[in-house]
Every structure is written in structure tokens, then in C-alpha cells.
Amino acid sequence: MDLVITLLIILAKVIGLTFLVVLPLVPISVYFERRFSAIIQDRVGPNRVGIPLTLFGAKKDFSFFGLVQPMADGLKLFLKEDFTPSHVRKAFYWLAPALVVVPALVTVCVVPFGSDIIVNGTAHKLVIADLDVGPLFVFAISSLSVYGITLAGWSSNSKFPFIGGVRSTAQMISYEIALGLSVVPVLLYFGDLNLSNIVEQQAANGWLLLPLWGNSVPWNNGGDYTAWLFWIPAVIAFVIFTTSVFAETNRMPFDLPECETELVGGYHTEYSSMKFAMFFMGEYAAMVIGSSLVVTLFLGGWSLGFGLDAKISALSIGGFGIGGLIHMAVFMTKVVAFILFFILVRWTVPRFRYDQLMRLGWVIFFEAALINVFLAALVIAAPQFGAISTIGGLALLAVVTGALVWVLKVSEKKSVPVSI
Amino acid sequence: MAVVKVTRPKLNTGEKMYLGAIFKGFIITMKHAVASLRNKTRGAEAMESSGMGITMQYPEQKWDEHLPEYYRGAPALVTDEQDRERCVSCQLCEFICPPKAIKITPSEISSDDPWAKVEKRPLEFEIDMIRCIYCGMCEEVCPEQAIYLRKDYAITGVTRAEMVHDKKKLYEIGGKRVGLVNKWNELK
Amino acid sequence: MSDNAATVEAKLPKDLAAEKGLVNVQIDGVWMQVPKGMRMIEACKLAQKEVPHYCYHPKLSAPGNCRMCLVQMGMPPRPAPGQDPVRDGEGYENIGWIPRPVIACANTVGENMGIRTTGELVEKCREGVMEFLLINHPLDCPICDQAGECRLQEFSVEHGKGESRFVDAKVKKPKNVDIGPRVRLDDERCIMCSRCIRFMDEVADDPVLGFTQRGTHTTLTVHPGKRLDSNYSLNTVDICPVGALTSNDFRFQMRVWFLKETKSIDINCGTGANITIWTRGEKVHRITPRQNDEVNSTWMPDSHRLNFHYIDGDTRLAGPILKGSNGHQPASWSAVIAATAAELKKFQPGEVAIIASARMTNEELFLTRELAGAINCSLFTTVPRDGESDGLLISADRNPNTTGAKLVWQSQDPAGPLFAIREGVRNGSIKALLVLGEDLADAGFTAEDLAKPEFIASIQLLAGPTAHASDVVLPGAAFAEKRGSMVNVTGRLQRLNRAVEPIGDAKDDWEILRDLILALQGAKPGTGLAAIEDVFKAMAASVPEFDDLSLSKIGDLGKPVVETGVKIPLLQNERARKAAGLING
């Protein structure tokens, strides 16, 4: 009986969090994308689609800011002719869209959406699988989506998709390194790989990028400045991680795999209807997951901060703890805000050239993330090390960094420009 | 054309990190966003903006009064002062048309026609408005000043056949045009 | 310098050239050797330097009246008595340039001559000539059929001034003049090059054209009481550099810049004139002769070039037809092929005869022989079609491929069995006929004869008595719709090319024959030869004359494969005129 209830709870979590929270976020972020970009470009954006009351004799349509637009788009994509060109490799061509969507949705299962919901005295965590290897699981699964894109590019049997697929493969593999390395300092700091625990720590002791309450503050923890000093490697890690997430999700300014001016539609050029929509969905789902990871690791996840979380968790209506729901709302707000940042970046930063993209990934971010790991380790170990060892370590790190920069400069000077 | 050689500007270390430039970019885009939300976008007043950005709301608002002189709408055939069809079906527009929207069937003008000396006229002249891209090349290439892009922009139809403008429809849109070069009627 | 070297250098360029019957000419600064007695304009053509011209045509005499081909000429100055000519390091004499231009079309090259086709003098001359030619030329281009292939248009773009300085009224001349059944004249457009006059006089031997009046009023016209009704009149349209002479048939049909050119050959007589088929989309708009100095020079008869309208005419058969109890009904290809094979199998070997045609290509004739083998039939024939030669290009044999039938069937008289077959049909011993692309009325069969056989299957282009009498009608492809090869009366293997797709559901004849053979053998459809190249390969294996050849190796101008001894009169005439130095071509 317990087993059945447990399974039912898991099922409810899966359906609730995946299909009622993350998937609806996809069309909503598409709507935000269109609306926000329109506003940036002095336009209006989709504002028409709504309930066509004029059809039934009313004077005005009920447009509701065009919020029904995503539904209309979805319906359109469903009803479009699902066209399979004759020259494609059918099996892989059909498999590829699924391989893009599924990994993006599977990674949802380790994201903590909120604190506990208490039903009848039992606490249920708002996370599908409370794994102790959260970030590793996310990296492992999300790196699978590169197969979808590569297969799409290859199986389309057409030049533009092929180039798009190859570009995407190289790009995603390159930035996975920076992505993985940049998150190491964070994990060092928290000493935990469980995302729920990481968020709880931040709720109690201040967000990684906002260490202003709890144990982070030196006068609360007996003069330990580690949390504040750690702010420096944390910011570096944040910048690298965020940028790498942009690259991993193939979004501007790193959308070379589907760069319209060069590759028509990139790897999904030959796709139409729902198969195309799956790529589209996969891309936006990846964006949602990326945002929630950034929020979880650096911006306190579901925590409202400033020591308010304990009070919120305690809120309940008749034995039903609603604190978890409020935390979930906080989490979603942060995620949407970060998605808006994604969109802002898209309409601000122009697309990179491919060699610049590769240089940024391999030459700058890889090295910076690596040095950052040591810097973070030094900051964490400083209290035990003592002043001399710490300064010595810092000096060594500075020398290594200087040497790296010097090698970089020298290698740049020697490189002969290749004219194309 | 003269070749201008441009050297890349030398960047200092701060500029090389691009972070400042990116933040400047954020400020610019956000400025635009705020401006359009407050309906203070530059040019919004002149364009009778609907309240956000510079966008007009079609079909409640129409652009007609604002159409510039050089606006390129539907291509149409014109007649001259003496109601002679100016087109002699030289088929240059059919040749130049980038989307191949124009189809002309030439024919000979019979010897008892008052304009027999022109010798040639189109029997059929069809423009497929589904294909037309309003580029105006037909107008530019026409040696007889017979085809013009008018200001009609709302070309609609419920069937493909409806969207093909035949000779009658084209003269209907085009109408009479006076003051053009008179080559065949010695009016000068 | 040693004595040895001196003896080697004693051979001057002029001596080296003279040994080969050539002369040294410097064209735009480059020395080259050209045949002695060649016109300067042809020498420039050899040097790939274009000299613009209107009146000059390599196959006609050169009166030099358009003045467009003016070039600068130079010869070595004559040395004073006792003085040696001055030579440069390579042994050429220095050229003294003549300060006035000469026409390149009527002057012949000489030893150590210099020609300049560019330079200020030449360009000024061309500009001036163009301006004069355009003074009275109407601005008719939008309605002129020549637009797009008009030499006046081309050269006024390249050498003209761009605007006219002429302020007086242009001379009015007759327009839209009916001078013959196939040719329309517009005198205002004429630039008086006289090519048409010379062609009718020298080649067609029917001098009906001439000039009247003088100066700017010069008018091209036909002799009083005569008309331009020669069977070669449309060649004047081809050679007219402007739109003065236009073809009634092609008039206002289509602008030439839309037309796709396909190189092929004419199938109206044994000469096999080389032609260009001009098509837009799937419609043939005109046919013009293509230069081949071994077959038709640059000419062809009107009757042949206009014989293409049937390709998409009203009587053209566009789908297979099966005769049932309720008359002729459309059917599918698989049904008609199966029905034909099943019917043919019902008869004894001696009861079936095949009437093929010498209008078929070699490939089709080859498959016909295979087909005869498949049904064990020894009675297969072509239909002779003899007429009279017109003394120019039309040969007495009006079948285009009689020579090919002889080669492919290895028979001296491919039309031999026709008489026996006709008698067989009449006396009832032949009960089934397979007619391939031939009209039985031409073969001497009367309507009663056609009613006698129990079964007739025919490949036909047009609805007619034969198609009407057939139980199965298989629509074939017209000459512009198929690829293949033919051998003309002189024994030259030439190539047909596909300009348009077969109309409607019609099929290439060789494919029909292949499918029929497959059906008779009981093989699965689609297992036979895949391409016409494969048919040629199979044929070349059994015909020794085609050994080592393939369709692509035939080339655009054909390959002689057998010596028949037949000569083409027009070419004989042309060669004589060339030998006499009257023409250059």
C-alpha cells in the first residue's frame, strides 16, 4: 500500500513538475521572447490572438495581451503538414527531435522547485528525484542532446543542416568543459552534490552571490570572511557558467548551429510541423533548465533570502504546509527573470564568429575556469593554511596565470592570419 | 569603386574583455524597451503609433495617407491619353521578373486596327500576385512606360486563380496615365 | 656569332611560313601564321579577335558595303634600291601602319602584314559607322522580333555612342511589307547589308531581291511581279543581321532570350541537315539551321524547318489506346504492352510481319530487329520514300535514316520485304501487323487492306488511317522529343537530341520497343536496358561500322562511318566557289 502511494506521489511530481510547470514555461517563454524583443525593437509584438468575441456579436475581441498566441502557435504546428523529404535517412531523421527534447526534460527531475510541502505531517520535497549527484546528473543527461542535433544535421542529408550539426557538436562539446569546470568551485564551497541541500544551505546562510545573512556574515560566524572572499571566484564562476549555458542552449550570441544568415535554419532546416516544434521545444526547455540551474547554484534557488525562508516554511493552512508553494512561486519568478535576461542578451549581443566562439571556449573560459578552481580552493582553505601559505599560494597562482596570459599573447602573435 | 582600407582599431585590455561594451549594449536595449513601454519611441508620433513602439494597428489604422511617393504596391498596366494600351508585349518584364510572376502571350495587331502600325500587343498579360515580390523591376525595365507599381497593397483572394491578375484587372488598377513619352502617336 | 648559327638563322619566318603555304600576320601585336589568300576578317577570327561586321558572311561573296569591319592595316615599307629590309630580332620586318582604315572582309592577308582590331582609329571608325547606321533605324526594339539576337543592338552597345546627334526627321520607308509567303519585310529596319540579295542570287539561285533608290532612301524590295517564295527564303531571315526580314511563322511568337537551344538534326530527308531546336518550356518555337560544312553548310529548306507544328498539334496522340468492343479507348501503358504481347503470341511465326520505318533512329531499328527475333519473325521492312532532289539540300531519299537501316539490319535493301508483306496481307497469309512509326497509306496499303489483318499494333505520332485501323495504338515520340542516332545519305552518323519531353503520356519509341520485347520474353518490366546509351552500346557490338563509338563520341557534328558515294549538290557548289576564291567559308 505504501509502495502504491509512494509511486503515486512520484507520478504526481513527475506530471506536475514536468508537464504542468516546465512544459508550459516553454510557450510562455516563447511569448515573452516575442513580446520583449518587440518592445526592444520599438514594436508591439503578438497582441491579437485571444477569444474572438466579435464572431459572436460582441464589439471587441478579448485579446488578453495576446497571451493565447503560444497556444495558437502550438495548434498551428500540430496541424501543419508533417513533411519528410525523400532524401533523408528516415530512422535517424525521426529519432533526432526526440533526442533533443527528452534529455532537456529528464534533467528536470533533479531541480528543487521549492521547499517541502507538508501533507498530514509528512514532508514531501518539491523535487522529483532527490539525487546526491544533482549537477553531475544534469551534465550527463544534457550532454546527450548533442546527439539529437548531430543526428538531425547528418540524417537530413543536406548541406546546411550538416554544417549546422557539425558546428553544434563542436560547440556543445567545447563548452561542456567550461561548464563543468566552472561549477567545481561552487561544489567545493557547498561540499555537497545534492541540489536540494545546496539550496537549503543558501536559504540559511545567504546566496552564493548574495552572502548577506546567516553564517556568511563575518560578525555572525566569529570573524570568518570566507563567504565574502569567496564572492570573487563565485562571480567568475557565475559569468563562465552563465555564458556556457548560453552556448549549450545554442542561443544568441552562440546560435551558430542555426545561424539564419549562413545556414538557413541550421540543423532543423529540413524539419517541419511537430518535428520542428520538438527542436524548438527542446531549445526552450534547455533554456528553462539552464536558468533554473543558474538560479539554484548561484541565486539561492527557491529561497526568498534575508532569513525569511524559515518563516515561510512554517506557514500552513490546516496542516497543509503552503510554504513550499510560496517557495515554488519565488523559484519560478527567479527563473522567469533569468529567462528575460536570456532574451535581453539575445537582442543585445551580436552573434560570434565561429573562430571567436572556439577561442572563447577553449582559450579563455577553459583556462579561467581552471584557475578559478584553484583560487576557490585557496579561499576555502585559507583559514586552515595560515597567512604565509595563503599568500604563497596566491603568488604561485598569480605566476601561473601570468605565464598563461603570456603564452596566450605569444601564441597569438605567432599565428599567421589565414585568409579565406 | 574606390577601395577603402580600414584598419582594425587597437583595443586596450579593458576593451578587449568586451564586458563594458556588453553592458553598454544592455543599457541601449533597455532604453528602447522602456521608451516603447512609455510610448516615447522616436518617430511614434509621426507614424500615429498605436501606443507601443512605432507600430500602427492594421486594419483599424491604415497607412494610406502615409504612403510615400515611391511606394511599390501592385504592378499594373496603364493606357495613354488616347486610351491606347501602352504595352507592346516586348516581354522584357517577363524576362527580368525575379520570381517569374509575369506571363505574357504576345499577338499581332490586325491591319484594320487604328493602331496597326504598333504591330504588337499582349493577347494575355497575367501577373501572379502570389509570386510578385513588388520589386519594381518590371517598371524599371519597361521601354514603353506601360507598367507601373501602384499604391495598392492589400491584394487578397481566396483562391490561387483569384490572385492572378489578368489584363482586364491590370488595366483596372492602372487606369490612364498622361504626360508620358509618346512614341507611337506623334503627339510629342 | 658562329657560321653554324648563321645558317640556322638564315631561315626567316617568311620562308618557314611559305613552306607550309602560309603567311605571317601580326594581329593586335601577336604574330601568327595563316593560310595565304585568306580574308583579314577570317584571320582575325582565327586569332580570336572579333571584328564586328554586317554584310560579310563566310558563305557569301564580300561586297564590303557596310563598312563596319574597318581595321588598321600595315605592311613593311618598300626598301630603297640596294637597301636591305629592316628586321627585328625574330626576323620580322618592321610594319609601316597605314593611317587610314581598310575593310577586313574584302582584303586578303599578305606576308608580314599587321592588323589592328583595336586602337583609337579603329574604335572611332566603328563609332562613326554605327552612328550612320542608326540615323534612320527606327526605335522598334520592343516590337522587333530580332531584339535579343540583333547585331545592330549588340554592336551599338559595344561600339555605339549611346545617344543620337541626329535632329532631322528620319526617312520613312515601307513597313510590314508582304514580300513572300513566309517572310515579312520592314524596310525601315534594313541597314542595306545585301546579305539576303546575295544569298538568293548565289546560294538559292533565285535572284528576286534587290535595292531601289539611292543614298538614305535605298530600299530593299522584290523584283516587280516576283515574290520571295523560294523554298530557301527563310535563310534570309537567319542571315539578316537586323529585324528587316522576319519569319511569318515565328513572328511575335516568343522573344529569343527565353528560348533554349538544343542541337539536333533534321529528319525530313536523307541529308539530315544540322539544326538548332529553339524551345521554351515544353514548346518548340522555331528551328534554325546549324553550321556543318559536311552536311548543310549554314542553310536548310523552309519546308523542313517549318515541319514541326505537328509535335503539339491537334492530331497528336498523347496516350496509349486500346480498341475494344466500344471502339478506341484510352488505356494504361502496362495494359497495352501486355495486350500487344499476348495477341502477338497467338499467331504462328509466319503470320506476323513488322513494318518499321527508315524515320526511326538506329537504336530503334536495332530494337526492332531484336523484337523480330523475339517473335521469330523474318518479315520486317522499312517503307521507301523517294522523291526528287532539288539540286541543293533536299535529297532524293526522303527517309532520314535509310543508310542507318542498311547498316543496323546488315541488309542491302531494308525495304525489300514490303511487297511480300503487302501481298501477304492481301491474300490473308499475314494475320498480324506491327507498324512502327509508319503510315501504312504511304506504304501502299488501301483501306480494304487495313481491314484484313486480325491484329494491328502500331507506334504512331498522329491520329490517321493507320492509327484508326490499329487494335493497339502506342504513342511514340517526335524527333524533338527523343535522343538517338541516324546515318545520312553520305554515310555520316549524326545525333538527335531531346529538346522537349514527349507530349502527355507518350513515350520514347525505343522504350516502347524494349518494354514490348520484355513482355514477349515474359521478363519483369523494368529489367531491360535502362538508357539509350546502353542500346547504342549493344548495337555497336553487332554493327561493325559503329565499333568504338558511343552517343557522346558522335559529337555535335557527327562522324562519317561509311562511304556511300552520295554527294550533296549545295556543298559541291560551295566548294567550287571556295576553290575559285569567291567565298571564304
Image (cartoon, coloured by chain):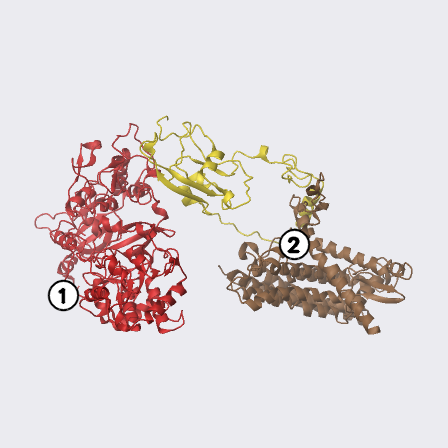
Q: Quadrant of residue C486?
A: bottom left
Residue at mark 1: C3
Q: Is residue A407 something that shows in the picture? A: no
Q: Is residue C549 above or below residue C136?
A: below
Q: Give amino acid for label 2.
A: Leu
Mark 1 burial class by Cα count in 10 Å: few <14, some 14-19, many 20+: few
Q: Which chain is yellow?
A: B
Work out which quarter of the rendered image holds the N terminus of chain C and state it.
bottom left
Residue at mark 2: A75
- Name the chain letter of the residue that bears numbered label 1: C
Residue A323 horizontal/vertical position (percent): 86, 59
Q: Is residue A266 above or below residue B176?
A: below
What secondary structure is marked by label 1?
Answer: helix
Residue A382 appears left or right of C53: right
In the rendering, what colour is chain A? brown
Q: Give amino acid for label 1.
A: Asp
Q: Is residue A245 above or below residue C390?
A: below
B186 or A180, which lies in front?
B186
1 and 2 marks on the same chain: no
A51 or C135, which lies in front?
A51
Q: Which chain is red?
A: C
Residue A313 horizontal/vertical position (percent): 87, 61
